[in-house]
Image (cartoon, rainbow, N blue to C red):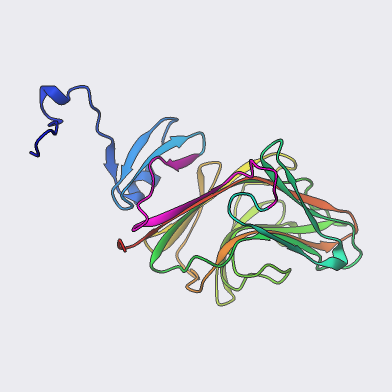
Amino acid sequence: MASGSIDLGSNAGAGITKAVSLTTAQRYALVPYDGTVVYDSSLRCLFIYNVDRWYPAQPIDPRSGFLMHEDWACNQLAGSNSWTGTGDSGSDAALYNNAATGAVGQTLQSQTTAGGYSTLFLGDSYTPGAQSLFLDVRSYPYALSTGSEEFELNIGFGNTATAAPFTNGIFFCYDRATDGNFWSCKTTAASATTKTVTAVAPVAATYQMLSFAYYGGSVKFYIAGTLVATHTTNLPTASIGARLKLVKSVGTNPNYLITDLFSTYSFFDTRR
């Protein structure tokens, strides 16, 4: 034992508690309660569970991965991570920041033709294959789609910022016209898509936590901490980036996407 260290098995270390060590798969198999602390041996990181998500509880070794946490608790659209907003000028798309509540909003104004969009995005900085990827997003649509007013939401990681569908991505989708009033989970590689329509409905003007965990050759999707889908096919290999996209397809009324958290962390399979 090194000089000056305390043996946890001795009386001198009796007041020190060692976190349970689990693999990533074992950690996600838990039914945790608030305050559960686990050392993830696969990712070499300590995690604490609170309400509906796992929080990395220590600085991530830059040789092993990175953490990006955005809650827009500042008076700028770009937040802390240089987000970019874009939209179709024909739809009068605009973006605004609500620093008072630490949330960002995307607004798609009235338009008479389909294809208007509003997107908030970061660069395509993640390349699947050599890295695991974990995402937690807390978001809501201001209004749900109807037969006369249809919108589509894409929330997660993808590779387009326009109204065009992602050709590579891992994301949650709300498309009432196709899937009914339910969230769907999608993995897309080279335009081929695996989709699971969940039994969970989006709720107008009410935040929901949308999460996924991509590791070990599969993507597990969670809503409010509950597993809703597992995908092992059409996992993207091309570079993708953070995306919050609102697209208009039918009608003339505006709609809004409000987000107050976008937290993602990634670990290299081997330390660099």
Residue under the point 91% across and 58% down:
252
Q: Is residue 261 above or below residue 88?
A: above
Location of residue 44 in the rendering, given as x and y in whole percent from the top left corner: 31, 49
Q: Is residue 13 above or below residue 167?
A: above
Q: Is residue 73 magenta?
A: yes
Q: Is 84 on the left or on the right of 125, as rendered?
A: right
Q: Is residue 35 above or below residue 159?
A: above
Total marks shown come to: 0
Image quadrant in which the N terminus is located: top left
Q: Answer whether residue 187 is visible to the viewer in this image.
A: no
Q: Is residue 248 magenta?
A: no
- State which quadrant residue 8 falls in: top left
Q: Answer whether residue 121 is visible to the viewer in this image.
A: yes
Location of residue 32 in the rendering, given as x and y in whole percent from the top left corner: 41, 35
The one of 22 and 100 positioned closer to us in this rendering? 100
Residue under the point 14% across and 34% down:
5
Residue under the point 51% across and 34% down:
51
The one of 136 and 67 positioned closer to us in this rendering? 67
Residue that lies at the very extreme toward the bottom in this rendered image: 190
- State which quadrant residue 64 falls in: bottom left
Q: Is 93 on the left or on the right of 6, as rendered?
A: right
Residue under the point 74% across and 63% down:
86
- The part of the chain drawn in magenta is 53-77
Location of residue 2 in the rendering, given as x and y in whole percent from the top left corner: 9, 39
**Secondary structure mainly formed by the magenta segment:** loop
Q: Is 74 on the left or on the right of 129, as rendered?
A: right
The one of 229 and 163 positioned closer to us in this rendering? 163
Location of residue 239 in the rendering, given as x and y in whole percent from the top left corner: 51, 71
Image quadrant in which the C terminus is located: bottom left
